[in-house]
Image (cartoon, grey):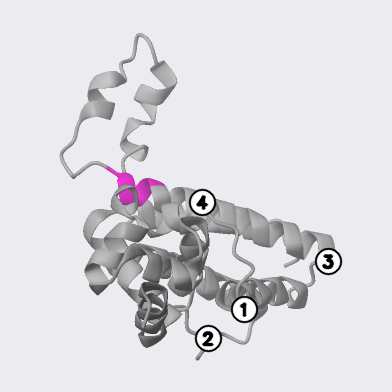
Amino acid sequence: MTKKQAGEATAGQLTRTAVIGAALHVLDERGLDGLSTRAVADRLGVRMNTVLWHVKTKARMLELMADAVLARIGYDDLPDVPLERARELTARYRRALLAHRDGAALVTGTYPAEPNTLRFADRLVDAFLQAGADERQAAWTAWTVNYFVLGLTQEEQAAPEEGDDRLVQAVGPAAYPALERVLPHLRQNFEGRFTFGLEAILSRLPA
């Protein structure tokens, strides 16, 4: 057996699902900056070419990982009322992103037209259509929700530890009077900001 045949045989013993699962473990351990096809290969105990045999490129691996993150979203027991369903879908989306270290940054950096991603988008758009939005409003509201959740969750996952007072030290009444006035509301409170932002977006839809 040639080295090429041996490498293909080793690759054939793995599945793409196993490779993506290992990649998500590396993500959780090292973060997005520490993720590489070589690191995934090391975790699996195979050569890097074996990983690439399944995912072709790192960019493609990231797309498949992003879609796997959205596979955590469940669709059971969703509310019947369309806007309530949209709220619940969005909350489940956020939880799926938070379930992995740098999950939001991973998804933000990709544009996968993959089954789990498309399924979530279809359910969210459908909720907006059923709420009375027209086609453009439903599509653009879904985009707006997506951008909002990704941005807020990415900030949440990169936020400094509790007790970090750099913002307090940087903001003073002389240079930034408006920011100093609202400083208590600039603190993390990501749950409250998530609810506030989502409601602001949904308020533009038909009642």
Q: For residue 135, which numbered disc appears in the image?
A: 3
Q: Secondary structure at mark 4?
A: loop
> Tag 3 or tag 1, which sits nearer the N-term?
1
**Towards the viewer: 118 or 135:** 118
Marks 1 and 2 sit apart, C-alpha to C-alpha, by 10 Å
Residue hosting label 1: 119
Calculate the distance from the C-alpha at mark 4 to the C-alpha at mark 1.
19 Å
Residue at the extreme bottom: 76
- Picture quarter with the N terminus: bottom left
Front residue (pair 130, 46): 46
C-alpha gap between disc 4 and disc 2: 25 Å
Query: Residue 70 at x, y = what percent?
Result: 48, 72
Question: Quick one: label 4 or label 3, which is nearer the N terminus?
Answer: 4
Q: Amino acid at mark 1?
A: Arg
- Vertical relation: 159 (above or below) 25: above
| Inter-mark Cα distance, 1 to 3 | 17 Å
Mark 4 and mark 3 residues within 8 Å of each other at the beta carbon? no
Magenta stretch: give its range.
155-159
Q: Nearer the viewer, mark 4 or mark 3?
A: 4
Q: Residues within 10 Å of mark 2 (few under 14, many from 20)?
A: few
- Is 59 on the left or on the right of 6, as rendered? right
Q: CA distance from mark 4 to mark 3?
A: 26 Å
In contact (CB < 8 Å): disc 1 and disc 2: yes
- Residue denoted by label 2: 75
Q: Specify few, some or many for label 3: CA neighbours under 10 Å numbering under 14, 14-19, or 20 or more.
A: few
For discs 1 and 2, the disc positioned in front in the rendered view: 1
Q: Quadrant of residue 170?
A: top left
Q: Position of residue 119 (x, y in %)?
A: 62, 78
Q: How many marks?
A: 4
Return the residue at label 4.
109
Q: Secondary structure at mark 3?
A: helix
Closer to us: 100 or 165: 100
